[in-house]
Amino acid sequence: MAIIRCINKQGSTFTVSPEALVSGFTESGTYYFEIVPESRLFVDDEPLERVRHEAFDAWRWEPGFYAGKVIAELVDTSGKVVASYHFDVAPDQNKLGEVSFAAMLDELLAFDTRLLLGNEYAQLEVGHEGRTSNPHLQYARLKRYGPALLSAFIEVLRKPLTQLHRERTLRPTHQLRRIDRQTLRRALQDPAATALLRNPEQASAGSEGLYFDVPTVFEDLDNPANQALAVVLGKALRRSRYVIAALQKIIDGEGDTGARSALAPRLGRRIEFLEGLYSDLRRIQRTEPFCSLRQPRISAAGLNAISAHPAYARAYRHGWYVLRPGIDGSREGERLWISPTWEIYERWCYLQVVAIMKSIYPDLQWHDLWPDSRMDVVRCEGRSSDVQVNVLLQVRCPAFDQPASHGFSSISGKRYPDIVVTVESPAGNSFIVMDAKYRVERRWVLEGMVSAHLYRDCLRWKGRKPDLSILLVPRAGGAPLLETLTYQEAHGVGVAVLSVEHNGLQAVLKPFVPGCTDSESAALSADGSSGHDTSCRAAPTGSPHQQDEGFTPFRTALVRQP
């Protein structure tokens, strides 16, 4: 049993055991695992760096901006996995508590699971309902069920199912065992054969060239059960080849990863695994009973035969486990990679902004739309007869010399602000930009304010500059002056605290949203962060808004913050 000793940068020592979920890890920490001789340690398919730590050789691991369950594998010199480990990485306590982070995950799961999916090391348990799929999900299922599928097919090859098949063949005299009426009828048409049958002991030497049409029964491998398994085998092969090509394309197109973990070191080992799986499955396809089938197909007879045979049922079941899409429904232990923690916070902030705007304008007809093929581009629109409110995630603002995108542009280079709010009403229009920053220390907050100033100066919506450019952080105290309403109203930039425990954004937004009276804004400025749902009314509700051309609605179950 490969138990490994681990030491963190504070000097605390603990052990990690195979298959057990080990806690004690934190994002952005540093950990040293004592080296096991003639082995390598991979974390999510990336080999750890070997260093000298104190008095022993160790593998060094530094979790990045992610939190969740991480899989590590101990591999020997031949490439065989000796043991698997499961690490539970907690969010940085200087940013978010573990309970708060779990609540954000739950809200994003309730809204739309696709907003959580990414390619970081940490994984999240998912279901198998729905039609959502991508190369990372397809690889995860090939990795999880591929070895079991291969083992089941090898078991099928040991003793494949056969079906008795009857046909007529020509046999020489010395191979005759039995004859039927058709054999006799055909033999009576040939004088030599008739003579042989009447007197076998006195048969002439010429009878050695006689052939008789006799019935033959043999075991045929071309049967419905093997035909159905051949369909699953072919689809698994095509899926493996497709995922290999998709992962290679990701490697070729990967540029500067910035705050994300590099994919290329991990994808190389994943492609190597898929190549091996594809080669093994292809070898099986070239072997009996699959190489001689006339037409692979799924039929009722084939499914009945498969259900009655344990080895066939296992191969068929794991084949469809590999091929099925979907990430919704009850979570069964399947895991899929999620986005980095800073991106999860950004998308969670979008949900909170939507909830706040809905509380400010409760009489509007609200619709959630996906205006782009990217899953992280979302637009929530509220309309009445004379009021229109939009909350957008990752809106595209083209450069100054390019056509505007839905009214958005930049007077310099192309920009993608995290969250944008626009309001059009008889009381006036407003344009607010928000940038979510996961770090809360003073130097990081001040560094993040660069983007707030940049968005305030360069972004335009229908020729209008932002009324407010705000930085969203999960904890107060980094730069207290920037969190005051006085500073924000005077300079048009600032910081707002938005977390599960504290909502300071509502009071920030109210003074910049047309349609609220001064008394309502003042009241909300005083107690808006306490969680009270004090809403000002917009214009009366008009007819529901018809969807814009090019936008498609999607199912959503938005969870309002308490």
Image (cartoon, helix red, strand yellow):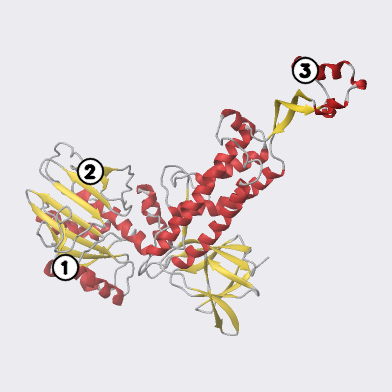
Q: Earlier in the sequence, mark 1 or mark 2?
A: 2
Residue bearing the label numbered 3: 190
- Horizontally, residue 279 falls left or right of residue 518, namely right
Nearer the observer: mark 3 or 1; the answer is 3
Q: Is residue 451 above or below residue 325?
A: below
Q: Residue 57: image x %, image y %? A: 59, 80
Residue at far bottom of view? 55
Mark 3 neighbour class, 10 Å CA radius: few under 14, some 14 to 19, many 20 or more = few
Residue bearing the label numbered 2: 366
Find out whether the residues at labels 1 and 2 contact each other: C-beta distance under 8 Å.
no
The secondary element bearing badge 1 is classed as loop
Q: Is residue 90 above or below residue 104?
A: below
Residue bearing the label numbered 1: 412
Q: Earlier in the sequence, mark 3 or mark 1?
A: 3
Count the marks.
Answer: 3
Q: Residue 232: image x %, image y %? A: 55, 41
Type of the residue with mark 2 = Trp
In the picture, which quadrant includes the N terminus? bottom right
Nearer the observer: mark 1 or 2; the answer is 1
The secondary element bearing badge 2 is classed as strand
Type of the residue with mark 1 = Ser
